[in-house]
Amino acid sequence: MKKYKSMIVILLIAMLCAGCKKKADKQIEEPIVEETVEPEEVTPEPEVEEEEPVVEEENHDGMVLSKLTGDWVPEEVGNRRPYAVMLNNHEIASPQSGTSEASILYEAIVEGGITRLMGIFENFSTDRIGSVRSARHYFVSFADEYDAIFVHYGHTKYALAKIDELGVNNLSGLSGIGTTVFYRDKSIKAPHNAFASYEGIQKGTEKLKYRTEYKEDFENHFTFYKEDTDLTSDIVANKVTLKFSKYTNPYFVYDKEKKVYGRYQFGGKHIDYNTNEQLTFKNIIVQYVKEWNIDKNGYQTMDLGNASGDGYYITNGKAVKITWKKNESSSKMHYYDEEGNILTINPGKTYIAIFPTDRQSDVVLSDKTSE
């Protein structure tokens, strides 16, 4: 009986195990289904085009580019004939008045080793320009290059002959128009006390009925860069010294912040008496010219009739070599770069040194940045 019960228990256990195995097998055979998640749709943001900054152009209505400085000036100024004024550069007469208003300033040796200046003016309003001194014939020739009305107080016989030869309009202090254009400052000793006023110059021009606009075939000396441009040169010119003579050794020092050259002479800054400010220039041109004594009095003359030569153009602390050609009979004069193109210079005021070609070693360019 016990044996029979044991067999029944074993049989029940076997059946139970078989059922569990089938259930387990069934669970194993069921496939595993992985749940997939649909990605959310992402709406792309619209592309935004970056707007270019709007650059407002300068309004130049009623204005023209100056033939002397390359700056924008009113039409009545840019089309007006300039005036070439002879300026005393003796130490006794310093500082001069009105020199800072000259667009271009010339300097050359006269007798006795001193230098004389000539300012080319296109826009000035001062009532005190000078002191004004006498003409020299080579300055007459330089004035004619700009179709300028020549302003002087006194002259040499050579200057009078050149004025007649070239047909240059002039305002002379020794002519009938003298008292209209000039006046004397009695606090200063003659001959260093003759001054011109802008009003007087205008009245003199009207009385003599001189043409007041550039002639149609006028050709400028150079072209201008549209923007300030550095020279690609190895010649450093932070300081420019011009040893004209034992009396006059002007020099220029480059101001890197203002990007102009300040002028010095007679041991200090060269200032304008009217403004008490130092003369400054954007450009310096050194023009080497053959020069010699014309007579026993030491008056100078120069080879300018149909001539050529070389020199330097200096700006922004650098210098490049240039050449020049002049035909006095046609009033044509041009500077050229090393490729033979008409010289392009920076907009601004220009100083031009007319320097003896046989004394080039007396022009010193250095990297000094101080006086």
Image (cartoon, rainbow, N blue to C red):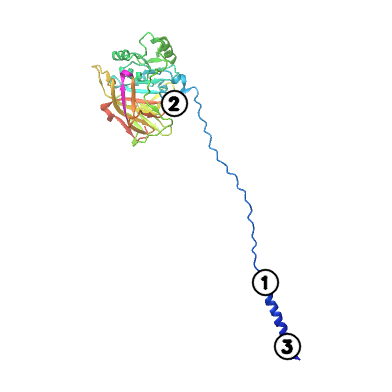
Sooner in the amino-acid sequence: mark 2 or mark 1: 1
Compared across the picture, whether 25 is left or right of 315 comes to right
Sooner in the amino-acid sequence: mark 3 or mark 2: 3
| Above-or-below relation of 22 to 332 | below
Report which quarter residue 199 is drawn in. top left
The main secondary structure of the magenta stretch is: strand
Secondary structure beneath dot 2 equals loop
| Amino acid type, residue under disc 3 in the picture | Ser
Q: Which residue is mark 3?
A: 6
- Residue 74 position, x and y percent, is 47, 21
Q: Residues within 10 Å of mark 3 (few under 14, many from 20)?
A: few
Residue span colored magenta: 322-330
Compared across the picture, whether 60 is left or right of 41 comes to left
Q: Which residue is mark 2?
A: 71
Report which quarter residue 279 is drawn in. top left
Q: Which residue is mark 1?
A: 27
Q: Residues within 10 Å of mark 1 (few under 14, many from 20)?
A: few
Q: Residues within 10 Å of mark 2 (few under 14, many from 20)?
A: some
Distance from disc 3 to disc 1, alpha carbons, whole Å, reads 32 Å
**Furthest residue in direction top, as rendered:** 176
